[in-house]
Image (cartoon, rainbow, N blue to C red):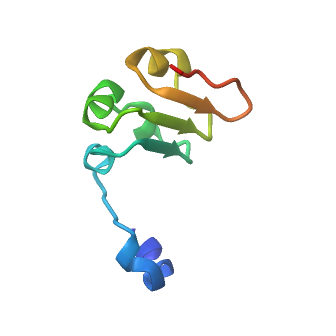
Amino acid sequence: MRNAAQDLKDIREYVEFETDPYKAAQEAHAIAIMTEWELYKTLDYKKIYKRMGKPAFLFDGRNILDHQEIYEIGFNVYPIGKPALTHF
């Protein structure tokens, strides 16, 4: 987090940093998974979806999640290299 804050210091007024993924998703319309960290495989995506603005989008850049399950929660799912699952 400190490295990111330092790297983005010139635009710091436009960027918010949050270590809690549930707080970070509050009122957001999109989530982007960009790492294979175990943490992101085990989050409560139903809880996250309830807190998000709608429509809610999830971009899985590492294909680590069960996309059908995430779609059934209500997300519009965009996995890398696979067809999107959308509610449109």
Across and down, in percent, residue 34 comes to 56, 48
Q: Residue at x 31, y 50 (%)?
A: 24
- From the image, which quarter does the C terminus lie in? top right
Residue placed most toward the observer, 17 or 36:
17
Q: Position of residue 14 (x, y in %)?
A: 39, 72
What residue do we see at 60% from left, 32% from top? 78
For this orientation, the residue located farthest to the right is 81
Question: Could you say which quadrant of the image residue 84 lies in?
Answer: top right
10 lies above or below 30: below
Quadrant for the N terminus in the image: bottom left
Residue pictured at 40% horizontal, 40% vertical: 39
**In this rendering, would 33 be left or right of 12?**
right
| Extreme residue toward the front, this view | 88
As drawn, which residue projects farthest toward the bottom?
10
3 to 81, vertically: above or below: below
**How many numbered marks, from 0 up?**
0
Residue 60 in picture, x, y percent from top left = 57, 36
| Residue at 35% from the left image edge and 46% from the top image edge | 28
Quarter of the image for residue 15 reads bottom left
Q: Position of residue 75 (x, y in %)?
A: 44, 26
